[in-house]
Image (cartoon, grey):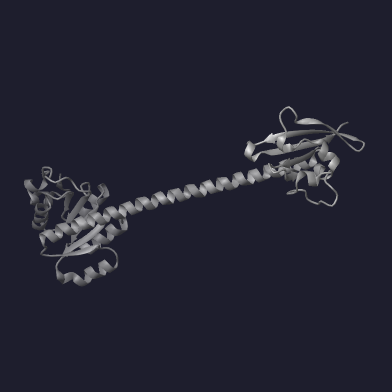
Amino acid sequence: MTAVTTHDPEARNAIGDSGRVAEQAMSQPATHVSDARVLLVDDEPSILKSLARLLRREPYDVILADSGQAALRILDAEPVHLVISDYRMPKMTGTELLEQVRDRFPDTIRMILSGYAEINAIIRAINGGAIYRFLTKPWNDEELKLSILRALEQQQLLAENKRLYERIRLQNEQLVTANERLSQMSADASLGLACAQSLMESVDVAVIAVDSNNLIVSANRRAREFVVRGTCDPVGIPLNAALPPDLVSGLPDAREATARANAGRLRQGDKTLEWRVNQIGAIDCRTSVIMIWECV
């Protein structure tokens, strides 16, 4: 349904009753521009009346104003998607109006309707970005209607691009926030790991972690004291190659340790040592933690 309305008393009188009543729904379904509002601005009532009659069955609302000042009041009061203004108007020309529309309502598409006498001024306005398109007087009815539809489609495309840009901007902000949080969590985890490593180094218990291939993946200070001489860093070395034979022989195979046989005692020289094996993780990627300490 197309509503032709005006916010100016003189323009309202000029249009007459037939121009301002709502038309019946069109036989064709409403297009994607059916919710759009088109503002027509001209100081000549006869021009407004002709345009209103021409566009009365188009799939958008038509609003009329008889001056630039009246047009700005309408724009302040409600959203407008397209403004078509006559160039030659008293007090405020069409280009002056559309320059203000560009600055104050940048999402509104702007078109000017004029004769060729003002072409130089209009070209300057087009080059300055104030005007989307120039329509000539007298106009071709079908060309005018098609130009309006194309302008509204352009406005819709710009609005969709803006919406997508805003969505991407918000997503980027969320990603930045998430990355900052992950960085903080990583820093906290690193600090926690450093504290744990410091604690492991300070205890008087040998702690050796062995992977499913029986390779040492970590060893604390006390564990390194049991390592075969000449082996500076046991990480990556098989357990039975890093530890002395008498110590290895007293330990169960870490890969086969069960809940029933995960602790015991062994002799190393004149010392009695206790040991415990704990399994961590799933069977296919299990880590065995061996703890050894001297009996008191």
Instruction: Please give left or right for residue 64 compared with residue 163 in the image.
Output: left
Using the image as rendered, state which of residue 11 and residue 271 is in the foreground.
271
Instruction: Please give left or right for residue 280 compared with residue 93 in the image.
Output: right
Using the image as rendered, state which of residue 203 and residue 73 is in the foreground.
203
| Vertical arrangement, residue 191 with respect to residue 96, above or below | above
Note whether residue 204 is visible. no
Q: Tell me residue 147's x, y (percent).
A: 18, 59
Instruction: Give the number of marks.
Output: 0
Residue, far right = 270
Q: Quadrant of residue 134?
A: bottom left
Q: Residue at x 27, y 50 (%)?
A: 76
Q: Quadrant of residue 272?
A: top right
Instruction: Please give left or right for residue 281 compared with residue 277 in the image.
Output: left
Instruction: Point out the image quarter for the C terminus.
Output: top right
Q: Residue at x 77, y 33 (%)?
A: 276
Instruction: Point out the image quarter for the N terminus.
Output: top left
Q: Tell me residue 165's x, y (percent).
A: 38, 53
Q: Tell me residue 203's x, y (percent).
A: 80, 38
Q: Residue at x 78, y 50 (%)?
A: 233
Note whether residue 134 is visible. yes
Using the image as rendered, state which of residue 48 and residue 10 is in the foreground.
48
Residue, far top = 260
Instruction: Please give left or right for residue 183 compared with residue 289 in the image.
Output: left
Q: Quadrant of residue 48?
A: bottom left
